[in-house]
Image (cartoon, rainbow, N blue to C red):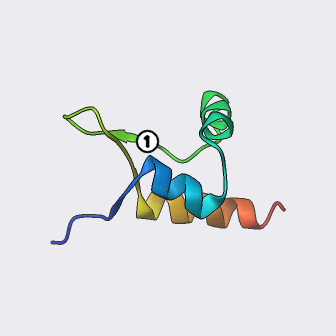
Amino acid sequence: MARPQMLKLPEALEEINMSRAAFYRMRARGQAPRLVKLPNGHLRIRRSDLDAWLNSHAATY
């Protein structure tokens, strides 16, 4: 079984055209895609989580 694709936070932010500060504000309100913290402390976003988040917000804007 293939592992899910994981994006680095800067890669995801560039794709959705959002600043880190805006992302963390949305995250604090529970409105951002889920972050995964790796054992080495790096943050990642699963491609599937980002795509689902984008799809859910595409209808609202």
Query: Is residue 35 found left or right of 17 in the rendered image?
Result: left
Q: Residues within 10 Å of mark 1 (few under 14, many from 20)?
A: some
Residue drawn at (45%, 48%), measured in percent from left and top? 9
Position of residue 50 in the picture relative to residue 4 (left or right):
right
- Residue pictured at 20% horizontal, 34% vertical: 40
Considering depth in this image, is 48 or 14 the residue closer to the camera? 14
Looking at the image, the residue that sits furthest to the right is 61
Q: Residue at x 51, y 56 (%)?
A: 12
Left or right: 41 with respect to 48? left
Left or right of 42 in this view: 25: right
From this viewpoint, which residue is outermost toward the bottom? 1
Outermost residue to the left = 1
Question: What percent of the width, then of the height, locates residue 7?
Answer: 39, 57
Q: How many marks?
A: 1
The quarter of the rendered structure image containing the C terminus is bottom right
**Would you identify the image quadrant in which residue 39 lies?**
top left
Residue 51 in picture, x, y percent from top left = 53, 66
The percent coordinates of residue 4 (x first, y second) are: 29, 64
Residue beneath disc 1: 35
Depth check: give the residue in front, 36 or 12. 12
In which quadrant will I find the N terminus? bottom left
Work out whether 21 lies above or below 47. Answer: above
Q: Which element is circle 1 on?
A: loop
User: What type is the residue that disc 1 sits on?
Assistant: Leu
Q: How far across and how far down the image is residue 53, in percent? A: 59, 57
| Vertical position of residue 8 compared to residue 55: above or below | above
